[in-house]
Image (spheres, grey):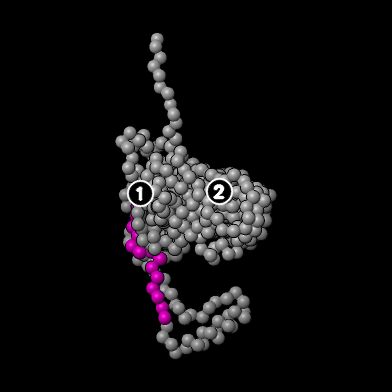
Amino acid sequence: MSKDHIIQVEGLSKQYILNRNAAEKSDTLYGNVLGAVKGLRTIGRKKETEEFWALKNVSFEVERGDRVGVIGRNGAGKSTLLKILSRITPPTKGRIEYTGRMASLLEVGTGFHGDLSGRENIYLNGSILGMSKQEIDKKFDEIVAFSEVERFLDTPVKRYSSGMYVRLAFAVAAHLEPEILIVDEVLAVGDAAFQKKCLGKMQDVSTKEGRTILFVSHNMDAVQKLCNKGLLMHKGELLQQGGIDAVISSYISNNALSNGFFEIEKNQIENLSQMGKVLSVSVLNAHNEVSGEIPTGSSWKISIRFVLEKDHDFFVIGYGFQSLFGNPINTSWSSGRPMKRGVYEAVFSNQEIFYTTGQYKIAVGLSNNNHSYFYNDTESFLTISDAGMAYETERIINKDSGLILNQLPVEIREING
């Protein structure tokens, strides 16, 4: 392994054998008895098993000080990869080499003993990492202050809330100076303020102290802010590795569907508000054709079909554009008006506000008397492309131009003297 690489993974694979006619397990005596009875029916039958490869021939290298975001859809193999790296589960095939101490935070309470107090667990975790009592003593006050659990420090951690558990577990993992810090989705348990605090701490320990971080999250905004490198996983395989922006872009492009029309499934709306529901969202180009791709600078419309189940005194419908990270960009809405029960179509026309190239998510909502009762962050996407751009416009539009392109009337006059 090169001296610049702190982690090297070669041909890593993990296989599970799924037994399809195994007796079901339960947390209750009745459930276990019932499962055993069902299992009797399979006596004499040939066992039905299936091979499932959670990881398939994954190879990559991580340099010292890198902040690596591991991204992909549910079931992509992200958590399996981190569990193998953390030595929690062995690989079926392949080889892993790493240097230095490694701390893992893969799920709430990783490495904690529920019957021990917070204080005792700090020392327990430190000893697991190979630190002496003197080393832990030096960091103890920082850990407690960061975790914000001083009041409950001598309480058994099994009585902690999930948020308290995570705060203390992260504080221990981040402050006891591991060379490699592995963090799975667990930070989603904490509140927004603590998540921001954790991200800042990980940024500091990497950039200022040269430690290496592997970070799994579905929050692309957090991944982009923290990480400089990325691994894109899909069905157990490593699809792409490289700079974080390029990896996130590939992930989003593979999952976003720009077809110009999105119909909300009945099973998604049948149990929602009895006041009204959105049925579908369409994007129409300058020729009034349904299209998922609009050239930059071209006019377009958003058509929303909806049903009102009751009369409304003061009805408002709106839609919003979001970045693919979920950040709001622009919101438009109708003027308030009384509306009768029925099926309607609202068409928003856009001829003045233009967006830079990329993909955008569409959210829609309905409200009555300033009370929002229907909101759908749809899986409808709009692509703004550079097709047909004039040369003069193309020179201006780039990734640094901003999201909204606003060409205003301007007067340029010569000043004499």
Residue type at the position of mark 1: Gly
What residue sits 59% from the left and 83% below the top?
Answer: 33
Is residue 139 in sight in this rendering?
Answer: no
- The kind of secondary structure element at disc 1 is strand
What residue sits 56% from the left and 62% below the top?
Answer: 269
For the residues labelled 1 and 2, the Cα–Cα distance comes to: 39 Å
Q: Is residue 385 left or right of residue 349?
A: left
Q: Quadrant of residue 97?
A: bottom left
What residue sits 35% from the left and 64% below the top?
Answer: 56
Q: Nearer the viewer, residue 301 or 271?
A: 301
Answer above or below: position of 263 versus 355. below
Q: Magenta residues: mostly which secondary structure?
A: strand
Queried whether the magenta region covers residue 18, the answer comes back as no
Q: Quadrant of residue 65?
A: top left
Q: Position of residue 290 (x, y in %)?
A: 41, 53
- The kind of secondary structure element at disc 2 is strand
Answer above or below: position of 42 versus 241. below
Answer above or below: position of 47 versus 192. below
Is residue 58 in sight in this rendering?
Answer: yes
**Mark closer to the observer (1, 2):** 2
Q: Position of residue 12 (x, y in %)?
A: 36, 62
The image's mark for residue 242 is 1
Query: Farthest top residue?
Result: 417
Query: Farthest bottom residue?
Result: 44
What residue sits 39% from the left and 40% below the top?
Answer: 297
The image's mark for residue 318 is 2
Residue type at the position of mark 2: Gly
Q: Nearer the viewer, residue 191 or 392?
A: 392
Question: N-terminal of the two: label 1 or label 2?
Answer: 1
Q: Which residues are magenta?
A: 48-69
Q: Position of residue 47 (x, y in %)?
A: 42, 83
The local crowd at label 1, few if under 14, some if 14 to 19, many if 20 or more residues have their Cα within 10 Å, is some
